[in-house]
Image (cartoon, helix red, strand yellow):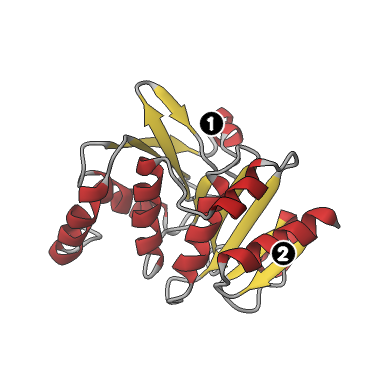
Amino acid sequence: MERVLNDQIIKQVHDAFAGIEKPVQVLYLGSQDSCDYCAETRRLLEEVIAAHDKIALSVFDIHEDQDIARQHNVTNAPGIIIAARDGSEITDLGVQYSGIPSGHEFSALINDILIVSKRDSGLNEETREFLKDLDKPLLLQVFVTPSCPYCPRAVLLAHQMAMENPKIRAEGVDATEFPELSQRFNVRGVPQTVINSGAGTVVGAVPEQRLLDEIARAILN
């Protein structure tokens, strides 16, 4: 079977994963029905997790394993969850993808694995305090394309925020793979972060404080 990643990229992944600290569990949910990128996504994840013995991969079918899909709020295939693993316990930190993390998004995937392994979002204290105090669910959907060089920064910021509170879920969404979802939220450019299914919207890879302000505005409304 043809590899997805070439030798140079695999070496870069090995080098990046020198910073891995604690175990990470990657959950892949695919489908055998009308999923153009499921097979390629699974191969990509298999090649990535092979780069470090503290990363493991679980493979599920979104239709056959509906309990798992519901548990992790996965509604699109391919779907990916980057979770913390401590012994046999898997903790979903709300770090999620819908679509193949290819092109520029591949770097976001690698960085997500690293920050989850550290169990530390890296956000500033003001942001952490605000997010930890949230008592309502917060969904951040970051629409991206593989060719967008600014998108990984927006996805990573949303994923960092998800790590601060179990009520937060952040989903990187490939806008081209899921056009109906993009149309629903009137996505015209990427990255575009949709807050709580349209309660707020941020266009561009904005700074941490700007996204925090938009989240606060959306929640207050």
Sequence order check: which comes first, mark 1 or mark 2?
1
Q: Quadrant of residue 152?
A: bottom left
Residue drawn 15% across and 66% down? 8
The one nearer the camera, 107 or 174, is 107
Instruction: Name the side, left or right, on which 87 lies relative to 54.
Output: right
- Separation of marks 1 and 2 at Cα, in angstroms: 31 Å
Residue 175 at x, y percent in the picture: 56, 67
Image quadrant assignment for residue 106: bottom left
* In-front residue for pair 114/210: 210
Q: Which residue is mark 1?
A: 68
Query: Dot 1, crowdedness within 10 Å: few (<14), some or many (≥20)?
Result: some
Q: Is residue 34 visible?
A: no
SS category of the residue bearing label 1: helix
Residue at 54% over, 69% down = 176
Task: Report the label total.
Answer: 2
Q: Could you say where residue 151 lies in the image, as x and y percent from the top left?
A: 49, 70
* Residue that label 2 marks: 214
Amino acid type, callout 2: Glu
Q: Amino acid at mark 1?
A: Ile
Q: Secondary structure at mark 2?
A: helix
Asked whether the beta carbons under mark 1 and mark 2 sit within 8 Å of each other, the answer is no
Q: Residue furthest front?
A: 125
Identity of the residue furthest to the top in this view:
88
